[in-house]
Amino acid sequence: MQHFDKQAKNWDNDPMKVKRAEIFAKEIRNYIHPKTTWNALEFGCGTGLLSYQLKDDFKTITLADNSKGMIDVLKNKIEKQSLTNFKPLLIDLLKDDLNIGKFNVVYMLMTLHHILDLNKVAKIFHALIKTDGYLCIADLVQEDGSFHANIPSFEGHNGFDKNQLSELLKNSGFKIEYYEICHVIEKKINSKIKKYPLFLMICKKAPL
């Protein structure tokens, strides 16, 4: 978490991160058609860029992250902008006792590839989502490992294969309803520009 704690103060200054949040918020909105009576959870929210784009779509949004630096920046934004339906939460969903209720939608952007135990987190999502609720995952398409080459401490997945992730989620009680490549990140790697596609997968909770 030290990497994200250090990055937190300047996170929102990157226009590409803001644009990415706008793109995926629009895609999520267009597919699930959220209701203003719904409660949502953003998992690995960072400074809340994605949720900010969805702030008028839900009754409440719980923004969960285990980086104190990110949550501190988020709390400051909430106070300054009077985002009264935002509920910041410093928590590790894989380790802490969960007593945070259930949600109509759980969504995340560039978070899942940081989670080593995918089976465990998928079961947690299933428990947190109401019947017929949605799980929305925006993340990297499987890549060669170069995306995090400049972060020696990175432990996680080099993106995801569509079929493998779909199978894991099906086995955890989700029905895959939507999958699209929605954005491409360009990064300079060894003085060359490399492209990393990002997908959006939307699943519906099915009874186990």
Image: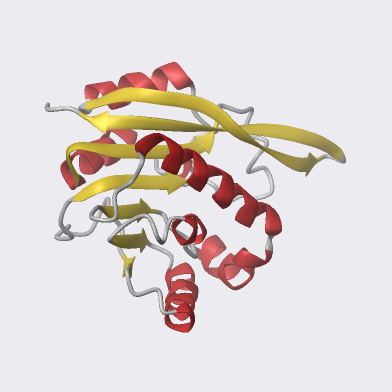
Horizontal arrangement in the rendering, residue 198 relative to residue 109 (left or right)? right
Where in the figure is residue 135, as x and y percent of width and height? Answer: 32, 38
Q: Residue furthest right?
A: 191
Residue placed most toward the observer, 139 or 3: 139
Percent coordinates x, y for residue 180 in the rendering: 52, 26
Q: Residue furthest bottom?
A: 80
Determine the residue positioned at 34% across, 35% down. Answer: 118
Residue at the (30%, 63%) spot, across then down: 91
Q: Residue at x 42, y 16 (%)?
A: 163
Across and down, in percent, residue 116 comes to 39, 40
Q: How many marks?
A: 0
Residue nearer the viewer, 67 or 53? 53
**Is residue 15 visible in this depiction of the protein?**
yes
Q: Give the side of residue 96 with respect to residue 164, left or right.
A: left
Q: Please report the residue visible at 32 percent of the width from the left and 60 percent of the height from the top.
A: 61
Asked which quadrant contains residue 92, the reply is: bottom left
Q: Is residue 131 above or below residue 89?
A: above
Q: Is residue 110 visible?
A: no
Residue 33 spot, x, y in % from top left:
36, 41
Quarter placement of the C terminus: top left
The residue closer to the viewer here, 40 or 186, is 40
Q: Is residue 2 above or below residue 106?
A: below
Question: Of 88 and 1, which appears nearest the observer?
Answer: 88
Colouring = secondary structure
